[in-house]
Image (cartoon, rainbow, N blue to C red):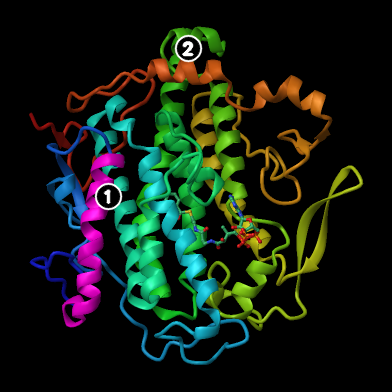
Amino acid sequence: MAVDYRERIPNNVGLSGNRRLQRALESWQPHYLRWWEELGPTGTQRDDIYLRTAINVEADGWANFGYVKMPDYRWGIFLAKPEADRAIPFGDHKGEPAWQEVPGEYRSALRRLIVTQGDTEPASVEQQRHLGQTCPSLYDLRNLFQINVEEGRHLWAMVYLLHAYFGRDGREEADEMLERHSGDPDRPRILGAFNEPTPHWLSYFMFTYFTDRDGKYQLASLAESGFDPLARTCQFMLTEEAHHMFVGETGIMRVLQRTCEVMNELRTDDPARLRAAGVIDLPTLQRFLNFHFSVSVDLFGQERSTNAATYFTTGLKGRYHETRVDDDHGLTDATWPVHRLQENRIVCEDEPALLALNERLRDDYIADSQRGINRWNRVLEQHGSDFRLVLPHRAFHRAIGGFADTYVAPDGRLLTEAEWRQQAGDWLPTDADHAFVDALMQPVTEPGKMASWISPPSRGINGQTIDFEYVKFGS
Ligand code: BYC
């Protein structure tokens, strides 16, 4: 369906044919814009930014580039094209026609999933709101804003579902999306990682690599949902999510590249000398990696989860690439290996697969995270460094699940609390690490120029050169 950009809310869901829904969303829109102004990227209202905007869901339509002022960005509502005669692919209702309306008996579970998903989107915009003031280049600044507007659009996607399918309580939930705030002691965001600060660009690149990747796996699982509007919404969101992870992966790669160059120039890997030369030493990068990986691993929930089992049997949330998995899609007798603590050691034992769905998705996520780490390590190898970045053990620094109250080293060794306290500063970013990275974050806004601590990207956006003026600052 073509998108009408003359409408206040561009959409491919036929909004103009449903006056009630249109009015409800149009009355939410000013609240959203006020939230964007108050808690979105700071001091950017008048800047022209080279952004991509989705104008339809076709291959040639979802990435339209041009200069836009962010408050004028057209946050639209887009669902992937419907699949004719789609059937529910898993669970007790497997093979029945996918639901086009909310199944009454699963209403509150479905609403909960949509609210949890939706809550993360504005949270990440809030977390990143000050980063624009310390951008390492115009290229990076533009990518930050691209991600921010798309997270805004992903909030619109969930708010549309709440308004369109959940009546009054859906509208209330949509309002609350703008009332909870990242890190707010009274009204925090729902999931832990979304209340952690993203104070500088190193955290941001790690966040977009690790935390946006949780988004990929959760959205892919929801894209299998028997509730067809949710599945179609998530399918389209996933096309945008890839760029966010690209920003994280290439961001860290460029940091590594720059550090390696200086290591070779100075013939040293001494952190103090490298820091003095204005680059981020490798042990510091590893500590930030440990932190962002561990808080992102928490986002998959408990290892044994009856919630997850219910979401699956009721057909609301599937597995990663559910339709490509070769089994009965019911999981009644299947098992899955799960890590857990047993008398002072970590064991991995088979558990009922239905209860282990969070752990299974976490396994998919960890394997995917490792692939990027391998690519980062290739940069180190190419520069002759023996240092290798490693993913910490899944039990390291956990706040959710069976390892939440244990002290575990990055290599999986169980520790006493005293041992942990003694060594935590070797494994997680310290205040001094943050202060050092903060001090590096001086804005660079001349086209084509990069901060001292990061290499240029290998290419620009949409075929433009690296020195293209990706952001034109308003007066
Ligand atoms: N922090 O049975 P469990 C993204 C709660 S990211 C705090 O394991 P379940 C994005 C849990 O809510 C993708 N609380 O839970 C990325 C439950 O609470 P109740 C976001 C947590 O339901 C970057 C209790 O602990 N999407 O899109 O199996 C930028 C029991 O746990 C946490 C989704 O998450 C935590 N980390 O699993 C922008 C998809 N973990 O019910 C965007 C939707 C668990 O006891 N959500 N709890 O009050 C879900 O599928 C599930 O809610 C979860 C949790 C996987 C998160």
Say few, some or many: other residues with alpha carbon within 10 Å of mark 1 (under 14 / 14 to 19 / 20 or more): many
Residue at 48 percent of width and 48 percent of height:
189
The image position of residue 471, as x and y in percent, is: 16, 35
The answer to whether residue 60 is visible is no
Q: Is residue 370 left or right of residue 451?
A: right
The image position of residue 197, as x and y in percent, is: 47, 34
Tell me if residue 138 is in the magenta stretch.
no
Find numbered disc 2 in the image and state the secondary structure of the residue it sits on: helix
Query: What kind of residue is marked 2?
Result: Arg
Tell me if residue 38 is in the magenta stretch.
yes
Please tell me whether residue 249 is drawn above or below residue 281 in the rendered image.
below
Q: Is residue 171 left or right of residue 108?
A: left
Give residue 157's quadrant in the image: bottom left
Mark 1 and mark 2 lie on one chain; the one further toward the N terminus is 1
The stretch of residues the image draws in magenta is: 13-39
Give residue 424's quadrant in the image: top right
Farthest residue, direction right? 343
Is the residue under label 2 in contact with that under label 1 (CB below 8 Å)?
no
Q: Is residue 94 left or right of residue 27?
A: right
Magenta segment, principal secondary structure? helix
Q: Which mark is residue 149?
A: 1
Residue at 28 percent of width and 31 percent of height:
132
Along the line of sight, the residue nearer the viewer: 104 or 298:
104
Along the line of sight, the residue nearer the viewer: 340 or 392:
340
Residue at 53 percent of width and 77 percent of height:
323
Residue that label 2 marks: 275
**Which of the image's four quarters has the N terminus?**
bottom left
Query: What kind of residue is marked 1?
Result: Val
Please tell me whether residue 126 is drawn above or below residue 436 in the rendered image.
below
**Which of the image's four quarters has the C terminus?**
top left
**Which numbered disc, 1 or 2, marks the residue closer to the eye?**
1
